[in-house]
Image (spheres, rainbow, N blue to C red):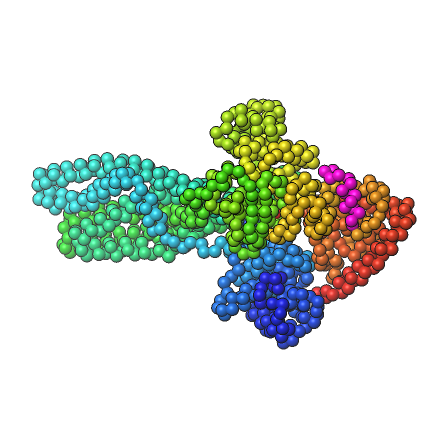
């Protein structure tokens, strides 16, 4: 792994330099694990397997350090060893001697630890996996320390299983550990206080000037009334009641009455403005959020969690709404009222006023630290809500799988676990928010008590008039009421801040690049589509496409083939201009796609995806999405061309039939045809097909392919497919492997070249054994298996006739180490893991077998045994023949038997020796 990705171990380096660097790497790894390095360790490690040491010294080091020195089972060194060394290598590569930045991966990649660990044991590891491992290692070291890390490794299974390790070290299941890991990645939860929300609302309200004016005016009236009442009461007592002056009494009673009426009237105005202003502000926010998801950079959107976005629209907006409608206006009014009251207090009596002011300041200062923490708890609670929604959504979507595999209990357990976390988060949220409110009202009550006591003492000493005391008591009632209200509203405000933070995190995501101001025109007809050295990466690290160049003269039928994950769909996404290349150009008629503008690109290109999800509306409207101004007649013509008109007519409401959620009332083939009709209506010059028929059964596949062939006449088609038989009619085939174009040409020229394509052809045709593939081709593929090379066609026919097609679920043992070889198996679809049994009874994985691979070839021999165990990792389709039938068949053809036995026996013996040696290599732990 290291050689390819770090310049650190360049090939031309001398042996000494490599040794020196290994030593440094080893030293740093020991540092991280808090152990003392042994002298001579590197030499011993390299000597233990010189071949591996030469090929990949870092891998050798990881292997030796973890299995020998740390005494971990063989399953651990991949995940933990390569992860640790990768992380250390990054530290070295930075060469700045400072604290290394942690390995950053997107949260969505923090899962599937078991798969990751077992893949990292294979000879050819994916760099992305190594990065993930490094991120996990850093998380594990940080959360559990070096001791926890080593314990984790020692508890890992020989196949890289982490379930027991997770239980032993963290006391939780591996799945729960993955969730914790994800939480840790959600770095930098906010720590903002409530003023953040107040400032935001003020800015948002400023856009609605008229409403804001009435809101402020109504508030001013309320506050003036609240402030003047004590003053009027003071005058009423001191100047009216005490000297028995009726005129003065009347005047102040009139003030009080009119003031009360005005305050009540403007109270209604206030309610009206809040009721209008609040929802306006929120709808502005919703509109911005919606625009954001439509305009977001496609790459960013692809890595976003949809459930979180949905939760932003439901839960988060709701708490922001409550804060905006209830808490913010209340806090504003009551806050000003408090300030006004304090000012009045000063005009009445300085000493009492100071006492009031100081105690109020304490009351609001007290819970400051707490409220920030409360905001954080509220933020976290929002995340837990999203996860609950996620489990519910997944359970609804996956009902079929859940029922078939009896996963109800597992799901229920998952949900209960999530509820536990939600409970904890909600409890923290409510308790901390409540506490903030309570601390405030506690402080205010204490202030009231203090001031009343002080005032009473002063009045006894005759320092203040009775009118002043009445005024102060009224003032204190206002202050108490206002402060109590603020205390009660603070929790709502705090919840609102958490919600707003989450919404703003969404709004802060980058938008797609804007359209060019004056888009270039390609001038009508597309003559060429080119990729010039296009590189692209989803996450900015390892490239998904690496200097891909394609030249397509139009119109042409072009196929893009290659193994799963090689970047085929990504190529289509770049043609669609969904993503832009990191470097290089995608050009139409020589013009870079980015200069064409959204509208022109959309008019040129249409896509039929692997599985079509429809909008929940009528069939007609779904087809019309291809061209919004199409007439009904045009829609029907497109449906006829897509061979779906008769089917639509047989639906209960014909073209007006509702297709159900996502199109669930139609079959997969029908949905594909609707997608085709939509694409035809759009009438694009370039049609992209991303495995458009692969989700269909063989019969509909053939029919839909026929339709596609018909409707794509005269257009440029770029089709991604796993079914290589389609390439025979293509003008050009591009073969993609690990993000690079490795071969191109016609089907026949590629077969003649006998390279990657020829190999894929061999595998894929066997993979299609369930009927879609002509027998001739299948026979041809059988002939190419090493075991059957040079065997006459008639024999292969007989062999094929006796083979049975079988489907097995995951985790099925296909062959068992040490058992008699009694079955020859071809995997035609799926994936299986081959391992050898170690002396301690555990298994070490050696290879992953895929479609096209054969196993149990030993069954062709008499009395052979298996040296390995093969267990399916996914559901598999198999083509099998048992030992007795195979031997019977061979017995009838002695010359073939002779041939097979003589060529295969030496191989069998060599394999026997190899595996015996392999088993000895691994010490008993
Ligand atoms: N949204 C995404 N975010 C991050 N990585 C992605 C994303 N989509 C694809 N990838 C990665 O990019 C690589 C290429 O993916 P792509 O979908 O192009 O493969 P493909 O050749 O179409 O495979 P398949 O035949 O399985 O459809 C894969 O390693 C995949 O993990
Ligand atoms: Mg794909």
Prevailing secondary structure of the magenta residues: helix
Residue in the image at 16% along x and 52% along y: 347
Residue at 52 percent of width and 30 percent of height = 624
Q: Is residue 491 left or right of residue 751?
A: left
Q: Nearer the viewer, residue 743 or 379?
A: 743
Residue 2 falls in image quadrant: bottom right
Q: Depth check: give the residue in front, 421 or 247.
A: 421
Give the vertical position of 484 relative to 210 (above or below): below
The answer to whether 343 appears left or right of 843 in the picture is left
| Figure quadrant, ligand 2 | top right
The magenta stretch is 770-785
Number of numbered tags placed on the structure image? 0
Residue 187 appears in the rendering: yes
Does residue 683 sit above or below 911 in this rendering?
A: above
In depth, the one of 623 and 218 nearer the eye is 623
In the image: residue 817, left or right of residue 197: right
Residue 281 part of the magenta segment: no
Rendered image quadrant of residue 674: top right
Percent position of residue 481, x then y: 28, 45
Instruction: Give the residue displayed 26% in from the left and 57% down from the top.
Output: 358
Q: Is residue 820 above or below residue 80?
A: above
Q: Position of residue 876 (x, y in %)?
A: 71, 45
Most extreme residue toward the bottom, as rendered? Answer: 39
Q: Is residue 782 magenta?
A: yes
Viewer-proximal residue, 296 or 662?
Answer: 296
* Residue 363, position as x, y percentages in the image: 31, 54
Determine the residue positioned at 33% across, 49% down.
199
């Amino acid at each position: 792994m290291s050689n390819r990705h770090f310049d650190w171990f360049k090939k031309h380096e001398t042996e000494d330099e490599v040794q020196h660097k290994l030593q440094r790497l080893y030293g740093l790894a020991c540092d991280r694990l808090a152990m003392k390095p042994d002298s001579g360790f590197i030499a011993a490690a390299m000597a233990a397997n010189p071949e591996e040491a030469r090929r990949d010294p870092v891998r050798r080091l990881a292997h030796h350090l973890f299995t020998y020195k740390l005494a971990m089972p063989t399953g651990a060194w991949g995940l933990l060893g390569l992860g640790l060394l990768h992380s250390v290598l990054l530290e070295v590569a930075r060469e700045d001697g400072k604290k290394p930045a942690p390995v950053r991966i997107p949260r969505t990649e923090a899962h599937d630890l078991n798969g990751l660990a077992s893949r990292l044991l294979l000879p050819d590891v994916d760099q992305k996996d190594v990065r993930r491992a490094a991120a996990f290692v850093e998380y594990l070291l940080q959360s559990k320390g070096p001791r926890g890390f080593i314990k984790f490794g020692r508890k890992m299974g020989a196949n890289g299983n982490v379930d027991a390790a997770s239980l032993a070290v963290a006391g939780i299941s591996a799945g729960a550990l993955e969730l914790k890991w994800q939480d840790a990645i959600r770095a930098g939860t906010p720590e903002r206080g409530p003023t953040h929300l107040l400032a935001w609302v003020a800015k948002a309200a400023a856009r609605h000037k008229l409403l804001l004016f009435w809101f402020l005016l109504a508030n001013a009236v309320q506050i003036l009334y609240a402030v003047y009442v004590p003053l009027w009461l003071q005058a009423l007592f001191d100047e009216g009641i005490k000297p028995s002056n009726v005129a003065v009494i009347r005047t102040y009673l009139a003030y009080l009455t009119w003031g009360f009426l005005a305050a009540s009237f403007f109270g209604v105005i206030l309610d009206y403005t809040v009721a209008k202003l609040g929802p306006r502000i929120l709808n502005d926010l919703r509109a911005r959020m919606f625009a954001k998801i439509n305009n977001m950079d496609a790459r960013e959107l692809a890595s976003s969690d949809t459930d979180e976005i949905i939760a932003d629209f439901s839960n988060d907006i709701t708490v922001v709404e409550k804060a905006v409608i209830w808490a913010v206006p209340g806090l504003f009014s009551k806050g000003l009222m408090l300030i006004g009251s304090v000012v009045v207090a000063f005009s009445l009596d300085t000493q009492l006023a100071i006492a009031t002011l100081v105690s109020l300041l304490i009351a609001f200062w007290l819970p400051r630290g707490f409220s920030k923490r409360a905001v954080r708890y509220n933020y976290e609670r929002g995340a837990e809500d999203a996860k609950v929604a996620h489990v519910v959504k997944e359970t609804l979507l996956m009902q079929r799988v859940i029922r078939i595999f009896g996963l109800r209990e597992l799901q229920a357990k998952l949900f209960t676990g999530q509820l536990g976390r939600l409970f904890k988060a909600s409890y923290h949220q409510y308790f901390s928010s409540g506490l903030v409110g309570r601390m405030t009202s506690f402080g205010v009550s204490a202030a009231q008590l203090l001031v009343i006591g002080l005032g009473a003492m002063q009045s006894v000493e005759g320092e203040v008039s009775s009118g002043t005391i009445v005024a102060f008591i009224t003032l204190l009632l206002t202050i108490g009421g206002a402060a109590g209200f603020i205390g009660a509203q603070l929790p709502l405000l705090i919840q609102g801040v958490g919600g707003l933070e989450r919404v703003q995190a969404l709004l802060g995501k980058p938008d797609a690049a804007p359209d060019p101001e004056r888009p270039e025109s390609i001038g009508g007809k597309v003559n060429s589509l080119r990729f010039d050295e296009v590189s692209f990466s989803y996450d900015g690290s390892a490239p998904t496409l690496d200097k891909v160049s394609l030249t397509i003269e139009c119109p042409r039928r072009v196929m893009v083939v290659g193994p799963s994950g090689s970047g085929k769909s990504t190529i289509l996404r770049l043609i669609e201009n969904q993503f832009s290349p990191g470097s290089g150009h995608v050009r139409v008629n020589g013009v870079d796609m980015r200069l064409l503008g959204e509208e022109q690109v959309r008019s040129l290109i249409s896509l039929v995806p692997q599985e079509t999800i429809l909008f929940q509306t009528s069939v007609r409207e779904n087809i019309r999405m291809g061209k919004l101004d199409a007439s009904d007649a045009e829609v029907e013509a497109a449906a006829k061309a897509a061979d779906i008109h008769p089917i639509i007519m047989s639906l209960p409401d014909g073209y007006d039939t509702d297709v159900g959620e996502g199109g669930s009332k139609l079959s997969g083939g029908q949905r594909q045809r609707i997608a085709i009709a939509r694409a035809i209506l759009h009438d694009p010059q370039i049609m992209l097909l991303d495995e458009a028929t692969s989700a269909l059964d063989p019969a509909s596949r053939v029919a839909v392919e026929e339709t596609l062939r018909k409707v794509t006449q005269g257009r440029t088609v770029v089709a991604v497919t796993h079914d290589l038989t389609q390439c025979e009619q293509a003008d050009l085939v591009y073969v993609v492997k690990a993000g690079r174009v490795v071969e191109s040409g016609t089907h026949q020229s590629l077969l003649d070249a006998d390279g990657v394509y020829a190999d894929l052809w061999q595998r894929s045709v066997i993979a299609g054994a369930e009927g879609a593939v002509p027998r001739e081709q299948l026979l041809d593929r059988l002939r190419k298996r090493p075991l059957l090379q040079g065997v006459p066609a008639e024999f292969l026919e007989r062999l094929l006739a006796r083979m049975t097609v079988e489907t097995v679920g995951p985790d099925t043992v296909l062959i068992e180490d040490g058992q008699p070889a009694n079955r020859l198996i071809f995997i035609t679809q799926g994936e299986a893991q081959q391992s050898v049994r170690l002396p301690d009874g555990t298994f070490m994985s050696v290879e992953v077998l895929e479609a096209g691979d054969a196993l149990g070839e030993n069954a062709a021999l008499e009395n052979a045994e298996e040296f390995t165990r093969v267990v399916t990792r996914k559901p598999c389709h198999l083509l099998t023949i048992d030992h007795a039938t195979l031997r019977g068949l061979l017995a009838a053809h002695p010359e073939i038997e002779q041939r097979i036995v003589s060529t295969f026996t030496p191989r069998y013996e060599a394999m026997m020796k190899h595996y015996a040696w392999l088993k000895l290599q691994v010490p008993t732990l």
